[in-house]
Amino acid sequence: MARKEFKLTGWHVLGIFGGAFGIIIGVNIALAVNAVSTFPGLEVANSYVASQTFDKRREAQEALGWTVEARLEEDMLILSITDEDGRPVQAGKLTATVGRPTNVSEDREPEFAFNGHAYIAYEDLRPGNWDVWLKATALDGTPFEQRLEMTVTN
């Protein structure tokens, strides 16, 4: 029985190129949709309005002399706020959002309690990089905002 010889034609080559580029374009679209849907990319609603008071807010915040550190010890998320002399600071009001740097699906707002030395919340964070977006108000009413980076290891 004789085998029929296959002949590569221009239509075959066109189909191969079309299929290859179709796969590439499909993967790019899927990745772009996933990237846009998982990262909001919005820090403030109106950057111009936020910029008008930025310097005053920054100077007031720096005048507080606060240093903030975030760490996870077992299942306790600890926010340490200290003044210029290293003494613990209790804020008038404190809220924080904890989440991944590039994805909002794991964002959470822990309930912090001040124990006389630091703010503590019980959280179970998976290993990896985390951000803590802290918003606090000093007892004199000065607003304080800071983003802290934290790496959780196993």
Image (tube, rainbow, N blue to C red):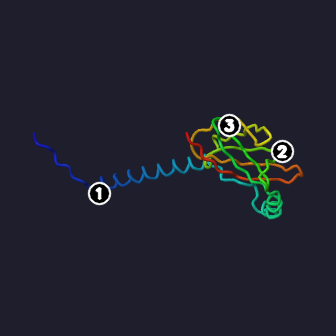
| Residue type, numbered disc 3 | Met
Residue at the right extreme, as displayed:
140
Mark 1 or mark 3: whose residue is earlier in sequence: 1
Q: Sort mark 1 into few (<14), some (14-19) or many (20+) by Cα contacts within 10 Å.
A: few
Residue at image mark 2: 93
Q: Is residue 21 left or right of residue 77?
A: left
Instruction: Between label 1 and label 3, give the one nearer the viewer.
Output: 3
Residue at image mark 1: 10
| Residue type, numbered disc 2 | Lys
Cα distance between the residues tagged 1 and 3: 66 Å
Mark 3 or mark 2: whose residue is earlier in sequence: 3
Residue at image mark 3: 76
* Front residue of this view, candidates 65 and 61: 65
Cα distance between the residues tagged 3 and 2: 20 Å
Residue 24, horizontal then vertical, whole percent: 43, 52
Cα distance between the residues tagged 1 and 2: 72 Å
* Front residue of this view, candidates 116 and 9: 116
